[in-house]
Amino acid sequence: MLDRIVIIPTYNEIENIEAMVNKVMGLEPAFHLLVVDDNSPDGTAAKVSAMQASYVGRLHILNRQGKQGLGTAYIAGFKWCLEREYQFICEMDCDFSHNPDDLNRLVTACETGADMAIGSRYAGGVVNVVNWPMGRVLMSYYASKYVRMITGLRVADSTAGFVCYSRKVLEQIGLDRIKFKGYAFQIEMKFRAWKKGFTIKEVPIIFTDRTLGVSKMSTKIFREALFGVIELRLKSLFGRL
């Protein structure tokens, strides 16, 4: 039975992809890895394809035409995994801001009772972030406070992008109804899972800012998250979620 897989969305991650693939493939117990690439002009997808011969049956790639957004990349990946009977489906960044060694901790949390396990930078009120400017740390930390104030979602790190889902969450959450494409996507997934009554557990991690490549954060993505939270709350109140 197919057990555990990691989804990594990529756009211009040639500096990181080879090291990340080798790291994930070296984990025990073994993971499969699905790279969802948005037609990176720097050759990211070609590098993954070249590495598949070294990890036959475990390393997969989903090529998409053009840059379509983080949320749609993950949804495409989730659907791909659900077609193949994976039981624990993880998501993480390619830039090593999430430590692949923590993947087993997330899967273990789901194996022992959680439906969704979040690699949390702010669990217990502790800020576990390395190499971020203080302004960005505060923005991220208080963004989660804002989400909780508006929606009632009881998650300390609602914008986290390091998550393990049990299969049933992705089967029941309504992937075709997910609206947001940027970091608001991460909030929406957690909010919908919470409203469905799934058990969510936060697993403390240390988040380290990327040292190679370029961040994909933008004003547009931030604005989507700011106003998207209000939209989620209103839809929930009127039964339209």
Image (cartoon, rainbow, N blue to C red):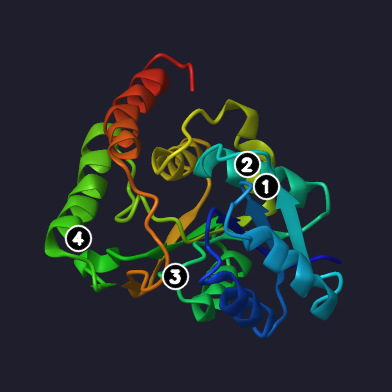
Q: Residue at x 27, y 40 (%)?
A: 147
Marks 1 and 2, how far apart at CA = 5 Å
Q: Residue at x 52, y 65 (%)?
A: 94
Marks 4 and 3, how far apart at CA = 15 Å
Q: Position of residue 58 (x, y in %)?
A: 79, 70
Callout 4, which amino acid? Val
Callout 3, which amino acid? His
**Sequence-wise first label, 2 or 4:** 2
Q: Is residue 148 left or right of residue 45?
A: left
Image marks 2 and 4: residues in contact by CB distance under 8 Å: no
Q: Pointer 4: what residue? A: 137
Residue 24 quadrant: bottom right
Image marks 4 and 3: residues in contact by CB distance under 8 Å: no
Q: Residue at x 73, y 59 (%)?
A: 87
Marks 2 and 4, how far apart at CA = 27 Å
Q: Pointer 2: what residue? A: 75
Q: Is residue 194 left or right of residue 206?
A: right
**Sequence-wise first label, 1 or 3:** 1
Q: Pointer 3: what residue? A: 98
| Residue in the foreground of this view, choosing between 19 and 232 | 19
Quadrant in which the N terminus appears: bottom right
**Sequence-wise first label, 1 or 4:** 1
Q: Tell me the element at label 3.
A: loop
Q: Tell me the element at label 4.
A: helix
**Sequence-wise first label, 3 or 2:** 2
| Residue in the foreground of this view, choosing between 180 and 166 | 180
| Residue in the foreground of this view, choosing between 220 and 3 | 220
Residue 115 quadrant: bottom right
Image marks 1 and 2: residues in contact by CB distance under 8 Å: yes
